[in-house]
Amino acid sequence: MTEILCVVGARPNFMKMAPVLEGLRAYPEIRPYLVHTGQHYGAEMSRVFFEELGLPKPDQDLEIGSDTHARQTARILMAFDDLLETRSARLVVVVGDVNSTMACALAAVKREIPVAHVEAGLRSRDRSMPEEINRLVTDAVSEILFATSPDAVENLRAEGVPGSKIHLVGNPMIDTLMRHRPKAQARRAPERHGLTPRKYAVVTLHRPSNVDDPVSLRRILDALQTLATRIPVWFPVHPRTRERMKDLGFHPGPGFHLHEPLGYLDFLGLMGEATFVLTDSGGIQEETAALGVPCLTLRANTERPITVTEGTNRLLGDDPNAILPAAETILSGNAPEPRCPELWDGKAGPRIARILASYVRSPVADTARPEPSPGR
Ligand code: UD1
């Protein structure tokens, strides 16, 4: 049996790894060993996703928890290095751009274990974003780079990554979305939460650039409160945002509904039936593109430009004054045409698994010459 270590750490990793693990089932000679770093923990940020996505219980939970970025990264590096010492991994698979992604990629290459990065090549070109640093470092040390979109392939080529390492495979997060959409719809989340389908807005905010500065957070919340006089606003609050809102002593007024973070299925159900979504999340820009739901992104840049050019996303910049006019445009019936990027077709997981299987079959000394990928 060939062992592949598959790493998850934070909430947005779980839905990206699920289709990879599923795809690897077609290769009984491969034993995926699932590692949870514990960057996100507890029922609402972690456990509910394992249950709802049918993810296997992690073979190992490193239980790292929250800390400053450098300390969290360092602690994951050390704990994952200790784990690598005890395993005979042929390959390490990391997903996305969180601290766990970068830390485990670094620990693996330091032991000369090749790294495969799912969702490689995305670039916001904003190095004040912790995720941009994680993306750059992870891609620089990865041997196999799985891109979700052609712009990601171009970014990697422009950075000098050889084409033989890059595979345009589509978007595994959309595999998960397609697979679970019927189940999510059947739960009738909007109705259960007292909302009328297509007559409310969903909001998510957690980026340091939006929520860590009390002045900008206050301005955003005021803008959302004004929006709530036009359309009900449903806001499941990330723990980091919740703490900042508590510091501000913020209490929502009429039409502005705050909620605990939601599980995958209820959030998908609410997002799928929303009039529009307002967010600063990366993944939600992609999910709304696939769902055809208008997305307003409260950021000055995006590492996912394809969601703007071929999806439903619109960048608002970082001024909350832009929220209301953009919402009015949608409410007056001028929403973007729903389109979905190519290869976001629910089959990324099997494509990734096939390339991984081909890689691990190649002789150990040979550094990666897997089969060419579709779309290249
Ligand atoms: C992390 C990722 C971000 C991703 C986001 C999704 C990095 C650099 N950032 O940001 O890319 O979009 O996850 O949620 O990896 N906390 C809890 N429970 C948890 C986890 C966190 O209460 O399970 C609280 C803690 O107070 C913690 C804070 O949230 O300090 C921030 O968590 P952290 O993992 O550092 O970053 P996120 O903001 O969640």
Image (tube, rainbow, N blue to C red):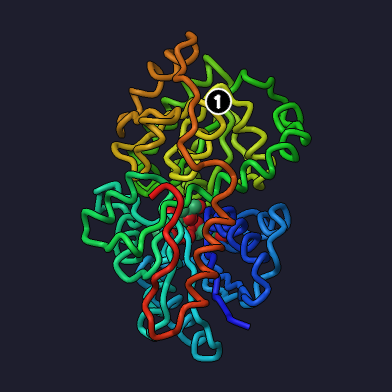
| Furthest-bottom residue in this view | 86
Given residues 292 and 23, the one toward you in this image is 23
Q: Amino acid at mark 1?
A: Ala
| Furthest-top residue in this view | 332
Q: Quadrant of residue 349?
A: bottom right
Q: Quadrant of residue 144?
A: bottom left
- Position of 210 compared to 181: left or right? left
Given residues 62 and 209, the one toward you in this image is 62
> Helix, strand or loop at disc 1?
strand
- Determine the residue positioned at 67% across, 66% down: 25
Q: Is residue 267 above or below residue 7?
A: above
Given residues 162 and 236, the one toward you in this image is 162
- Determine the residue positioned at 30% across, 32% down: 317
Q: Quadrant of residue 38?
A: bottom right
What percent of the width, then of the height, locates residue 148? 43, 49
Q: Which residue is mark 1?
A: 201
Tell me, yes or no, if residue 65 can be seen here: no
What percent of the width, then of the height, locates residue 324? 41, 19
